Structures are given as structure tokens and as C-alpha cells.
Image: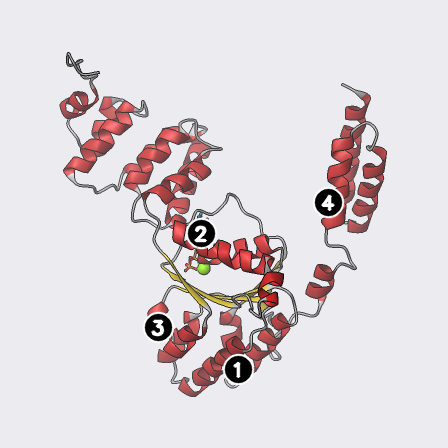
Amino acid sequence: MSSAEGKIEKDLVHLARVALSGRTQDVTALLHRFAKSYRENAPVVATAIAALLREAPTRSSPLRRQTEAVLPVDVDTRFHLLRIEENPLFEHEPVYAPEVKAALETIVAERRGIAALLDAGLEPSRTVLFTGEPGVGKTLAARWLARELNRPLLILDLAAVMSSYLGRTGTNLRHVLDYAKSLDCVLLLDELDAIAKRRDDRGEIGELKRLVTVLLQQIDDWPPKSLLVAATNHADLLDPALWRRFDITLQFPMPGHDAIEAHLRAVLGPVSEGSEAWSRVLAVALEGRSFSDIDRDVKAVRRKAALAGEAVDAHLPALLQNYAGTKAARINLAAELVGSGLLSQRAAHELTGVARETIRARTAPRPKVPGHG
Ligand SMILES: Nc1ncnc2c1ncn2[C@@H]1O[C@H](COP(=O)(O)OP(=O)(O)OP(=O)(O)O)[C@@H](O)[C@H]1O
Ligand SMILES: [Mg+2]
């Protein structure tokens, strides 16, 4: 081991100790020292640390200052009306249908190229509405936008806003939106339909009308520097006046075969030996399910495998159990399972109900026909 490596190892342990004790300022001081002392013997590490120190939000940086302002709370309950995610984390990159991806990228491009827009007397899109079934990535997309735009994500807890006393919901909502307007941020009004759904409850029609009025006003004068994202899986329940207000409305479709395959590859890649082949097979069987359903089922399988001390691959067939494809589709699936070496003929037969002879006939190497190839 070189002496530089030995030093890095020692420093790493030291850094861990200081970091775990929660002394952020000491961590920063230590990193400054490392950046200097590695310059000669480990220049790559030194440069990387120096870059991180430049970018990190410090006490005096705008991001820190912004989000340290007092969070709005309900006057009576003192519940926070907002949640802030400063550096959203992703287990893996989200997968989106091409049209959704293009729209999201346009939103980012408009913000990055804002100078050109302003020069042309234009503004970027300020408000977007995401609609779609549960678990297709609407909330995730807001998080993704915040990360791409390097802004904090503020999430309005509509339930908290609406649980407040009658007559106060409008005030609370205005309070939150005013706060968000004062920052450079992405504000997410998640589950916007909560407002619409309450229409049936306790005859609070007047209150809801006030709430919608506040929203309409706020959406209209939303400033171009921040991005307002609203999401709902009950677009049909929304007030049409509200719907019309948004600069962009984006419909998130249920994932198709290719999206599911790409997502499975990302999810299974790090944990499954045969992730490529399994992703291909499972994408067929799981079509029609949402990303979050799929994630939940994969997690359940991984837990089972971990408890049994077995490989994940040995438990993946369980994900095929509820497959209800047509006979022809089941034959294809069985052939693919055997053909790509994932399962034996017998296991494929038990799982899909396709006769072993049929599978054998489909997977046996075809005799070469003379004159072809
Ligand atoms: N497009 C996607 N790519 C990858 N993973 C996804 C995607 N969409 C959803 N997921 C997975 O499902 C989980 C739930 O997604 P998300 O919360 O974004 O759904 P949603 O559309 O907001 O649903 P809801 O309407 O129920 O709020 C995510 O945390 C992620 O694990
Ligand atoms: Mg959501």
C-alpha cells in the first residue's frame, strides 16, 4: 500500500468519526484540510473534495439561507404545512415514456435557457399538472425536476392544510404558497384531488370553493422563477377551471412493456445473477401493473430470498405465479424461460401449465433446412 493510501484510510476513519458525531462545521474544516494535503499525492481526490466544498450548501449559501427561513405551520395545531427535500435521493433513475421524458426535459431546458427566453420577451412554463394512475411516477417526477434544476423540493401536505379548522384552510394555503413564492424552489402540490374529493364530506362546499379560489389566484400569479407542480390521480374530479390554469398538463401513462423491462433491469441488476433474462421474461408477465406495484412485489421476493439465505433468482419465479396470459402467450413465456436457461422444462411447466412436450417442441434446436442459411 502506498503511503498516500494509508493516509487516506486513516483520514476516512477520522472523517467518519467526526461526521457521525454530527459536527458539520468540523467535517467541513476537515475536508478543507484534506483538499490541501492531498493535492500532491492524491490530486484526483483533492480536486473532487475541493469541487464538493465549492458546491455544498454552506451556512451562508443562498440555498441554506432560503430553506432555513421559518417553515409555515398551522396556527392552531402548529403542524408543519410543508415538507422540504433538499437533495432528493434516487435508488435508480426513473423510467418514463418517451413523450413524458421529452416534456420533463423541456421544462428543465426552459429553466436552464431562461436568459434566451427573457431576451425574446418570453417566460418559462411556470406551472405543470401531472395526471395518471397511482404509482406511475408523478411524485417521483417532481423530485427528479428538483434535482435537475438544483432546487429544493417543497411538498405541500394538503391533508395537513385541510385538517385545520373550517375557515382556516384558505389562509393556510395562501400562507404556504406565499412562502414558496419567496424562494427559488420546486413546489409540489401532491394529491390535488384531496381538495376535490372532500366535496362529498360534511357539506363544506363554501370552504372548498374558497380553497379553489385561492388556488386559482395563486396559480395565475405564480412567479416565473419557481416551478409549481401539482399531481393528481383523479383528474376527472378536478375543477375544470383549475385544470385550464396550468401552463402544461402532462398525462403519465401506465408503463408499457419496454418501460417495465428497463425498470426491472435497473431494479434487478444489482441483486440478480440473471437480471437481463429475468427482466425480459418478467416484463411480459408484469405488463399492466404500475411501477410501484412491481417494486413492492420485487421487494417482497427479495425479503423472502434474504430470509431463506438464498439467491434472489431462485425466488423470482414467484412473480410469474399470477400471470394470466392467453394460452399462446403462456407457451411463449414457457419457451423463453427454458430457452434462456432460467428454468428447467419441468419448472416452467409447473409455473405456466404448458405441457412439457409443447415446451420441448418449442425449445428444441430446429433441424437445419438445406438451402436456408
Ligand atoms: N417512472 C418510474 N420509474 C421508476 N420507478 C418508478 C416510476 N414510477 C414509480 N416508480 C416507483 O414507484 C414508487 C411510487 O411512485 P410515485 O410516488 O412517483 O407514484 P405516483 O404516480 O406519485 O403515485 P400516486 O398517485 O399514488 O401518488 C416510486 O418510489 C418508485 O419506486
Ligand atoms: Mg404521488
Q: Which numbered disc, 3 or 4, marks the residue closer to the eye?
A: 4
Residue at image coords 25%, 41%: 323
Asked if the residue at label 2 sits under 8 Å from ligand 1, the reply is no
Residue that carries the numbered disc 1 in the rendered image: 170
Residue at image coords 76%, 18%: 1
Q: Which numbered disc, 2 or 3, marks the residue closer to the eye?
A: 2
CA gap, disc 2 and disc 1: 34 Å
Q: Which numbered disc, 1 or 4, marks the residue closer to the eye?
A: 4
Q: Which mark is residue 237?
A: 3
Instruction: Say which amino acid is labelled 2.
Output: Lys
Q: Which mark is residue 52?
A: 4
Q: Is residue 65 left or right of residue 180?
A: right
Q: Is residue 302 left or right of residue 228?
A: left
Tell me which corner region of the image, top left, top right, bottom left or bottom right, holds residue 12.
top right
Instruction: Say which amino acid is labelled 3.
Output: Leu
Above-or-below relation of 239 to 206: above
